[in-house]
Structures are given as C-alpha cells and as structure tokens.
Amino acid sequence: MISREDIDTTLARMILSASGWRGVFALDGGEESSSDKISCAHKIISGAAARIFAEYLESEKCGVRSEEYKPTILLGTDTRPTGAAIIEAMMPVLLDCGCEVRYAGIVSAPEIMAWARSKNFYCEPHEPLRMAGFIYISASHNPIGHNGIKFGLTDGGVLAAEESVKLINNFYTAINNDDFISKITSIIFTTNHTNTANLPSETEAQVCAGSCENRRFCSWSEKTDEYKNVAYKTYYNFCNEVIWNNNRKIEDVFKESLAKKPLGIVCDFNGSARTVSIDKEFFTSLGFKFECVNNKPGEIVHRIVPEGESLEPCERLLEESHARDASFALGYVPDCDGDRGNLVIFDDAVNKARALEAQEVFALACVAELSHLVWTGELSYGGVFGEALVKAAVVVNDPTSMRTDRIAECFGISVFRAETGEANVVTLARNLRNEGYIVRILGEGSAGGNITHPSAVRDPLNTVMAIAKMLSIRSTVTQSGLFEIWCKYSKQTEKYKIDFNLSDIIASLPPFITTPAYHKDAVLRIKSKDHGALKDRYQKVFLREWEGQKDELKTRFYIYKWEAIAYNGTAEKRKLYRFGDAGRGGLKILFFDSEDKETAYIWMRGSATEPVFRIMADVSGSEASLEKWLLDWQRKMIMEADSSEKLGMKGE
C-alpha cells in the first residue's frame, strides 16, 4: 500500500496554479523522459483531482443543475507519453462519481475548449442540461517528461483564477484525509487489476501504470472516435466564427484576394496534439498552400517550447518551400497542446527565413486585429479630434512589451494589464466587456500568440490568420486595406506601398528591444521561498542602486524617473510604496524620460508553472545595449536580495 509520505513527497514536487497542475509525471523522474508510465502516487493524485473537480461542478451548480443527472465532463489529452496513464487513473473515479464522461482522445487545447463552449455538447436532445466542464491533460510547453491537468467550464477557457484557488484548496483538504486517499486508491486499483484481494504496493503499481485493464474504461472509450469527431467539427466551425467575427464581407474579400495572390504556410507540428486537429483541412479549404513536417502524433523530435532552436526546423522547411514556390511566406510551430504557436517568416529584406520574437508576433496580431475592427466599422471615429466613438481595449499580461501600448495609442484605445497567467488575462477582458468595452484581441505578449474574442485561449490558427488577413486584405479604389489603415493611424503613410510584403509590415512596428521570456538570461534560480519578503529586500537594494546610477541613466539612457507597479490576478496597483505588496505576483519598475513618457521597464515574477524566477527588460527604440544593461542590473539586484536572506536582512 502506498504511504502518505510517498503522496506528500510527489505532491510537493508539483506546482498547482490556475495555469494547470503540473509536475514531472514520468516514472523515472526525468524532465526529458519519454516513459509512458507514472507512479502509484501520481495515479492517486490524478484520481483525486478528478473527484474534486466532479464535486466542484456539483457544488457550484456549473450549468443547469439536474438532480437526475450527474456532471458531464469532457476529457482529452495532448500527445505526451504519460497522458494515457493519467486518463486511466481519472476514468474510474469519474465513473464512480456518476459522471457522464466523454473522452475525445488526443485533442488540442483550443479544440477541447471550443467543444466545451458549444451549448449542446453535454446532453442528448431529450435530456435536461447537465452540469458540465472539461479536464485536459497537458503540461503545455514544459519538457516531455512533465505533464499536468487543466480544468475548465463551458465558457471556453480554463477556470478563472479565483475559482482555481477554490478548487486547489478543496483538493488539499481532501488529499490530507486518509479515508479519502483509501477510497481513491480502492477505486483506481481494484478496477485496474484482475486480482483485487490486495491493493498494489508501489512497485506493483508501477508495473501496471499505463495499462488498460479496466473493462469499464475500455467500454466507455469505444466512443472516443465519435467524440473526437464532434470536437473536431465544433472547433472547425468556431475558428471561422472567431477569425471573421461573423462578418461575411471580410471573409469574401479575403478569399477573393487569396485566389488572386496565393499564400503558402508551413508547419512543424513536432508530434503535438495539432497533428490530429483541423490545421491542414482548415487552411487548404480557405485556399492556402500548406506543407508540414513531424506530423505524426507523439513523435516529439525537439524541445517542446516553440522558442529559439525549436524554430530552426520550421525555418529550414520554409526556405525549402519558398525556393520551390515564392508564395510560401509564413510558418508556425505549436507547443504540445497546440494553444500557442510562434512564427517564422520568409524575410524578403534578408532573403531568408527567420523566427519572429514572441513579442513581435503579438504586436503583429494586434496591428492586424485592430485594423480589422476599423475595416469592418466596429471601431469608428468622429468628433473634432477624431476620437474613437466606442470604448475599446487590448488586454495583456504584465511583461508584454510597451510596443503594444504604442500600437493601441495609434488607434485611440486603452491597454489593460493583468498578472501573468492566461486565466488572469481572460478574466480581465471579460470584466471589461461587461463594462461596455470592445476587447477583440488579448493575450500574453511575452509568450507569443494571441487570444481573439470570442475565443478564450491562445490559438496559432488565429495568429497566422491575423497576419494573413493583413497580407491579403489590400486596398481597393473604395476601401483601404488593413496595412494602409495601420499606416494611416500610426502616421506612417510614407511606409505604405501597393506591393508591400510581410517585411514591410514588420518594419512599420514601433521599435522596442525586449528580453525573450525563455532566453537563458531571463531565468533565475533563487533560494527565497517568500517572494514578498524577497521583493522587500530588493526594494532596499534598488533604492540604493538608483541613487548610485541615476546620473548615468539620465545621460546615457534618458531615464529620469521610475514607478513601481504590482500585478496580482486581474489587479494592477500603481505607485507602489512597498515592493513586497506584490507578493508572488509581478513587480515592474517602469522608467520615464524627461517628458514623463514611459520609455523602459524591468520586471520580475516567480513562475506559477515551473520552479524558476523570470526577469525581463523592455526598452523603447533599437538600442540593444540598454536592454542588456537593464537586464544585467536587474539580475544583480535580485541575486543580492536573494543572498541577503541568509544574512538575516529582512524587509520592513
């Protein structure tokens, strides 16, 4: 029988947050392990998580409550090796709870979330509505040996941060109860072993991890193909709704333009969940040319996070495709669950393929989608000074580059920031829509990709299509195209030309140098467990350093003032007096020039999904040396504050 210590030790190595419950699930403990087996402790934790979510759905009356019917739960996984073992542990527990479970096998994150938001997914036509939600097995961009669990309802996104906290608290309360553990253990292992006289020891459990001996599971999974088909079709239709925003005119204009001026797209699927999603059918049905590599599910051939070296195979593919056919101009690489995808382009300015930085990708998507709103008339202007006639906003996370602010300023709209975490950004956008704002585009610029309303999750299809619209919806005698709209609103009419290409669009973006979130220089390993106390100590270091460096900052970098800002959940607290009030949230030091214009920032936050501390610098202009100087300065100050903990220095 597995011990309480085994469970506690395993759980201590996991991170539970609104972004997912993640850890290294591979049985051998390797971050890059391709093992498909998980430990008995991980099985029990997975089963316990499933039960707590089922109970949450009932207690919160998610959906329309029916005494006759228990919750319907959609279930899916990405292509990580340990996904099936986690599903197998969850299945008997969910069935024991009386849930109607609909398992679609391998699905991308946007796919299962689109399925969840479709109002008829959870009951047959003759049944009353059930309480409903989804469980998705994925660790997103983390290494292959990791895995995790995401929970959501029927709004098309993961649980809001405050609801996630409630679920996590419920889980910890239950997992600390020995009777609860015994019940979960009994459910999982008496239904997964032919010999039910004795529950398995840890060693015995390892042998069966990943097996499928449960008849109820096998019987229930017979409908997997059927549910996958429903999820696929629902997602396909929803993507059209999102991209065109139910505007038939812009859709028709796009298709007509694409027929006259073809565009080719390549994709390195890297064995991700998108290998069995809609991508190829969706793009080719619109008239795109499409080529791909590594399109067999589960064959993950390089690092999962679509940054840096992970984009090189796609660059090579795009160059090969472009050499055969010059219409190939774009490529993308998704992460394992397929909710983000960073881009490569064929850059005509240098005559080769190159990767775009994550912040650059988000900026392009913002320009495209805001120009889309102007083109359709949803974002209109009037009055003496041409003010926007509607309230509109872009919502981003705290380390998104101020390049987004400059873009939004051109369109006369606002930028709102939330703490890092997709759930925070989505929740803030919903809150603003309730206040009457149009929020078409949102996302985490630091991570790349974008969320386009009414979607509530990043999706590489939406990112690619935003840029494709920019390239294809061109000016006519009667109406400006998207790029010309952007050039007019950004007062760069001299940069518009009839035969523009993607390199011209990129050259028109506001110039900023920003630390890539996954660059080695952006990641610190710190000893401090109390991040609030760390930030208090950092404040003392920063104030001392500011006094020593302010003259150089003025003369060399034109930085005259600073302001501290905290980001916690959806709240932004400016003019922060005590840095420690940021707690585990984001802390930004915003810098101003002599005219009080925001010109740069340094930022820090402990990751909620990985055991690392992230730092970043963002600088207006093209002076890379300033970004490096600020980042090095930030690292030095944080490490001093971290080391001062063991010397007894404490924040007041």
Image (spheres, rainbow, N blue to C red):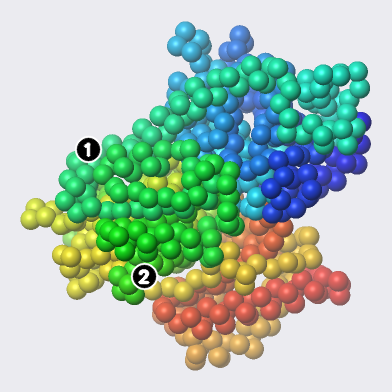
| Mark 1 vs 2, N-terminal side | 1
Which residue occupies the extreme left position in the image?
Answer: 477
The numbered mark at residue 352 is 2
Q: Residue at x 49, y 86 (%)?
A: 557
Q: Residue at x 58, y 53 (%)?
A: 301
The image position of residue 38, as x and y in percent, is: 76, 39
| Numbered disc 1: secondary structure | helix
Q: Nearer the viewer, residue 507 or 580?
A: 507
Asked whether the viewer can see residue 579, the reply is: no
Give the alpha-carbon distance from disc 1 to disc 2, as whole Å.
Answer: 35 Å
Q: Residue at x 86, y 75 (%)?
A: 647
Asked whether the viewer can see residue 193, the reply is: yes
- 250 horizontally vs 179: left or right: left
The image position of residue 640, as x and y in percent, is: 75, 77
In the figure, 141 relative to 457: above or below? below
Q: Nearer the viewer, residue 461 or 415?
A: 461
| Numbered disc 2: secondary structure | strand
- Image quarter for residue 541? bottom right
Numbered label tally: 2
- 38 horizontally vs 156: left or right: right
Quarter occupied by the N terminus: top right
The image position of residue 151, as x and y in percent, is: 61, 36
Q: Nearer the viewer, residue 236 or 51?
A: 236
The image position of residue 171, as x and y in percent, is: 75, 35
In the figure, 556 relative to 649: above or below? below
Q: Residue at x 91, y 18 (%)?
A: 197
Q: Which residue is mark 1?
A: 248
Quarter occupied by the C terminus: bottom right
